[in-house]
Image (cartoon, rainbow, N blue to C red):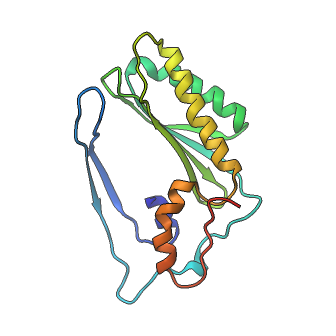
Amino acid sequence: VLPCLELLGVPKVERKLEYRGWSTGGQQIGSIKFKFTPLAWNQSLDATLWPKPTEADSVKRIDITMVVPRNVQESLKASLKFELDLVFPGVDIRNVTEEDSRHPTRLYVLLVAHTTNGFRFGRDWLYDKSVKGKSVDDIATKMAQRVADGLDTEFRRGGCVDEYLQDQLVVFQALAKGRSVIDSDK
């Protein structure tokens, strides 16, 4: 939500992940810090300056974040590349975060598709299935298929942003001056 809000005129929000939280492999509370710069007094967001949705919008890049055990990383990278090449052929794919979760049940992957109009679509999965009796390749394939198919389905629905981001933007749309259109589907 923060990159989108910055695209819409909210001043840059500084953020720092101190440590990740987990609900598997022993619960652990995470911590992140934010520093907000408020809009100037009597200033509001101006919807007339926002990027306009277009029918011809396309995906120009997909960023991958994976936080999985080290022994899963290469298999997951290969599975993601294969799945993303099927549904988004020719799109630039970047591994932006690769972290060792240091536990076999701590498996998380996030895909963020950057569109030509500056908006983003996302799909993620905090793996919630048993890993017992499953090979690394089976887990990686299942994760890659789920997030790639979910991102493809979301993008094909049309609109500027995914359904989850749309829910978070409604308040900012209501507070902005001018008419705002940020559809999650067309």
Residue closest to the far front = 129
Would you place residue 57 above or below residue 99 in this image?
A: below
Going by the picture, which residue comes out furthest to the right? 56
Q: Left or right? Give the position of 70 relative to 58.
A: left
The residue sitting at 52% across, 84% down in the picture is 177
Percent x, y of residue 51: 62, 69
Question: On screen, 45 above or below 117?
Answer: below
Residue 109, horizontal then vertical, whole percent? 47, 35
Q: Is residue 74 visible?
A: yes
Residue 111 x/y as whole percent: 53, 41
| Residue 185 found in image quarter | bottom right
Residue 9 in sight in this render: no
Please identify the quadrant where the C terminus is shown: bottom right
Residue at left 60%, top 40%?
Answer: 150
What residue appears at the point 66 percent right and 42 percent down from the top-left corner? 152
* Residue under the point 29% across and 59% down: 34
Where residue 95 sits in the image (x, y, percent)?
Answer: 51, 35
Outermost residue to the bottom: 42
| In this rendering, position of residue 134 left or right of residue 106 | right
Residue 115 image-quadrant placement? bottom right
